């Protein structure tokens, strides 16, 4: 195998610089894992392309020798997407990290896939524009598109797929294609953009993205509303949505999780089931929305509603929310994080969370619940001792139980973290014979099965 | 052939009732055309399924004998989608016209594909909900999904694809699949929903749709703003969008088209380049938006801005806009309508429309220009004498010229009317080698090429 790897390196060098290819053990290890609980596995080598042509060259060689190719952004996946279980080549996009063009008046930005969310945010501020998808982690935009990331703002602005206008993609045969164009609407041809977004690197590697932007809202108001129970909080959200209040974020944090927040972020939020809320709009419209929301939450026994007075406390609120996973990890250093990710119709959310909490207690697991309740998507953050097989089994059992519950009420096994490795076992159950169609597409576009194999669908 | 058709009818009868199958000449003729200028062609027979199982049965027979299948909604296509050029079976969905379930609190509705937009609107009113996509024509929802319809409201609410939550589809082998679920977000598997939406019946037949709904806005205000030139109007729209005003509709109607409106709809709108505008929201927010918009349009030499005082005048305004195509047809009884449909980045729209108007004058064509300017999508409504080959050629030449212009500035040959028959000739130019990928998908999912052949892609 060593010989094979060396000859592979030599072949790659026909187009790439030596510094773009490595078999360094530390770097291989870095590309063997992500932020999930899934087992690590190192690639044979890591390459650092600097252009679509580099990626095309790499994939043509991989295609010729039928070698697995696994794209790597920043390794912030929670479902093992970037772990190269078939070894082969890990393509690290960190050297393709340029913001290519801001088309300010078209509300578009063209970026390379290795650009991170925070890097883009910084670049856009000078234009009075922002990019709406915020999954919490400072992921790369290529990774966010590959996994169709979302997060706290999707209730108003939509998910990653809604923001991707055009992609440059290197396909499994090394061909470079464009999936879209720069017009806001198009019905020309099949929607390859939506197919590639969320395909988790199993069809092609994204080498350039054109993304939609929004003007920074005239006004933003954020606040916290504490409720006697999770159920009251969830029902209040359903009522807010029904009233047509165009809420920009609405996050549920359960009592256990507020406690973690207070410990980790040095806040003194009331330790009750809480909604973190945010409104975007013009000032008079927003005041009206806030007043209306206050009336609604009062009907659901809201015990306290506080709006942040300034930007600093607003940022603190969202930092605390985003750091919640880290708060759990920090508070349980001997354990690993397993995050569930089902999404259900909004009216089913109260029941689903109640069921999950009952199971957590029944199985005596360490877990908080939080959720993007405006979308019906919630997470149980399980802190598990991965060296205890019984505990791992309990956690897997719990995950299966809540997936079964979600599917039985019209939901999905994964709202935003993706299939990757962890949710493959639920694909047949969720999709039935539509899975055959997905496999036919995978086989047609990646006949040799080299693109991120053993993820999402098997072909 | 008559023998073959008779044996086909007999085979269909093994599952369908006799009244569901017809070879009646008048009915065949009705299914030989749509609202486009494309040549008519009658199917061999028309079937009227009443369930997904019926459709599955029909397609299995078509598959066995390699007979073309063309879905038919209401025939309101503008690009020949429903015309069965390979003859075979026209599947008319008019008997599948039930609103199956309104999930009021989940903002979802489940419908059969033959339900029309106006039928759905009527049904939803009692829930205080509305369906956002309004292409003007009272099309079927199945047809709107198959062609990814949009129209005047997409600047705020998005296109058809954005509203489709789940589909039941009969594939080319007769298998019935579901493409989605009832949760607002899902990253489970490939996005088959987005692939089927806009695939124009070339992959499968839609037999059920679950669609997203919105609460009827607290307040709606509509108005008209007249400008000295089209260019001033377009630039005003760019400025409104840049200011982040969440406008719900913004339609450009050029001077020639306002004249047609006044004649046909008995209005007395000022005959100048005009924007028809609409705002949705709460009252204080909306007042703020309207004031802000008035300030912006003043900067672009708006000569008159009028807001409608009541629902009746607002409805009249939008009826006038929607009836514009009919106004042209009515005003030119000896001619047929050819509508162009390019879409460009918003900043390119002024130049694109100016170019189109110059070409219209140069070629001495009869045409008005109107457009969904918030999306960069405009239409030239050409009234052509299809019995005059020279005029047809001039119109085709004009269409090609503006497509070339649109593609050269990052746009698309079709923003909302679809590829159908009319835009196939531009697919290779627009998509380059991405067309190979589209063809690979078509071949994988419809290997015998029976699903609406000779449309969108050839395989």
Image (cartoon, coloured by chain):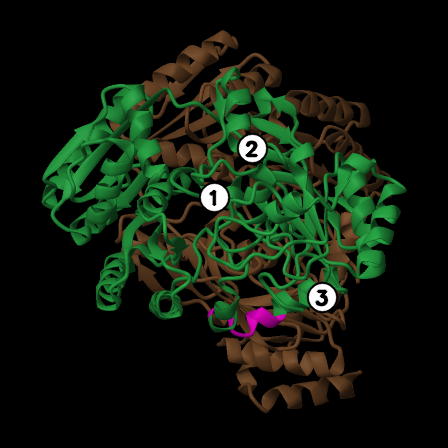
Chain colours: A brown, B green
Image point (76%, 45%), residue name: B177
Image point (57%, 54%), residue name: B81
- Measure the C-alpha gap from mark 3 to mark 2: 31 Å
Image point (76%, 61%), residue name: A440
The quadrant where residue A46 appears:
bottom right
Q: Are marks 1 and 3 on the same chain?
A: yes
Which mark is drawn over residue B116? 2
**Residue B186 covered by magenta stretch:** no
Relative to B366, does residue A228 appear above or below in the rendering?
above
Mark 2 falls within which chain?
B
Looking at the rendering, the stretch of residues picked out in magenta corresponds to B430-436
Q: Mark 2 or mark 1, which has the lower sequence index?
A: 2
Relative to B47, does residue A312 appear above or below in the rendering?
above
Q: Residues within 10 Å of mark 1 (few under 14, many from 20)?
A: many
Q: Quadrant of the N terminus of chain B?
A: bottom right
- Measure the C-alpha gap from mark 2 to mark 1: 17 Å
**Residue A262 visible at all:** no
Q: Residues within 10 Å of mark 2 (few under 14, many from 20)?
A: many
Q: Mark 1 or mark 3, which has the lower sequence index?
A: 1
- Residue highlighted by disc 3: B443
- Residue highlighted by disc 1: B159
| Count of number-bearing discs | 3
């Amino acid at each position: 195998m060593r010989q094979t790897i060396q000859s592979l390196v030599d072949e790659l060098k026909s187009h790439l610089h030596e510094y773009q290819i490595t078999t360094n053990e530390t770097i291989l290890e870095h590309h063997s894992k992500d932020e999930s609980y899934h087992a690590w596995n190192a690639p044979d080598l890591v390459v650092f392309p600097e252009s679509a042509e580099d990626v095309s060259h790499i994939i043509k060689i991989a295609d010729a020798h039928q070698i697995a190719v696994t794209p790597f952004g920043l390794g912030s996946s929670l479902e093992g997407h970037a772990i190269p279980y078939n070894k082969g080549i890990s393509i690290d996009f960190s050297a393709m990290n340029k913001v290519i063009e801001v088309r300010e008046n078209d509300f578009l930005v063209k970026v390379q896939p290795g650009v991170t969310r925070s890097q883009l945010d910084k670049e856009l501020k000078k234009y009075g524009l922002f990019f709406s998808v915020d999954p919490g982690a400072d992921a790369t935009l290529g990774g966010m598109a590959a996994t169709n990331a979302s997060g706290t703002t999707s209730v108003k602005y939509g998910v990653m797929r809604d923001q991707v206008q055009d992609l440059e993609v290197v396909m499994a045969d090394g061909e470079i294609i464009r999936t879209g164009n720069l017009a806001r609407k198009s019905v020309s041809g099949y929607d390859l953009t939506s197919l590639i977004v969320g395909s988790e690197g199993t069809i092609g590697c994204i080498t350039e993205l054109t993304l939609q932007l929004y003007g920074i809202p005239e006004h933003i108001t954020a606040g916290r509303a504490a409720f006697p129970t999770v159920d009251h909080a969830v029902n209040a959200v359903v009522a807010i949505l029904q009233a047509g209040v165009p809420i920009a974020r609405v996050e549920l944090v359960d009592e256990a999780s507020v406690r973690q927040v207070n410990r980790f972020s040095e806040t003194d939020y009331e330790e009750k089931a809480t909604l973190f809320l945010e409104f975007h709009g013009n000032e008079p419209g927003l005041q009206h929305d806030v007043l209306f929301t206050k009336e609604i939450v009062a009907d659901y026994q809201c015990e306290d509603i506080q709006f942040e007075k300034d930007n600093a406390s607003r940022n603190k609120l969202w930092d605390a929310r985003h750091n919640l996973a880290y708060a759990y990890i920090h508070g349980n250093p001997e354990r690993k994080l397993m995050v569930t990710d089902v999404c259900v119709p909004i009216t089913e959310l109260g029941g689903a969370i109640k069921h999950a909490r009952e199971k957590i207690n029944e199985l005596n697991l360490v877990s908080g619940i939080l959720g993007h309740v405006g979308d019906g998507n919630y997470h149980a953050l399980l802190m598990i001792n991965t060296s205890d097989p019984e505990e791992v089994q309990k956690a897997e059992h719990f995950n299966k139980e809540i997936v079964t519950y979600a599917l039985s009420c019209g939901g999905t096994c994964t709202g935003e973290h993706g299939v990757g490795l962890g949710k493959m076992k639920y694909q047949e159950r969720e999709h039935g014979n539509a899975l055959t169609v997905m496999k036919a597409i995978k086989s047609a576009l990646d006949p040799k099965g080299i693109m991120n194999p053993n993820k999402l669908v098997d072909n």
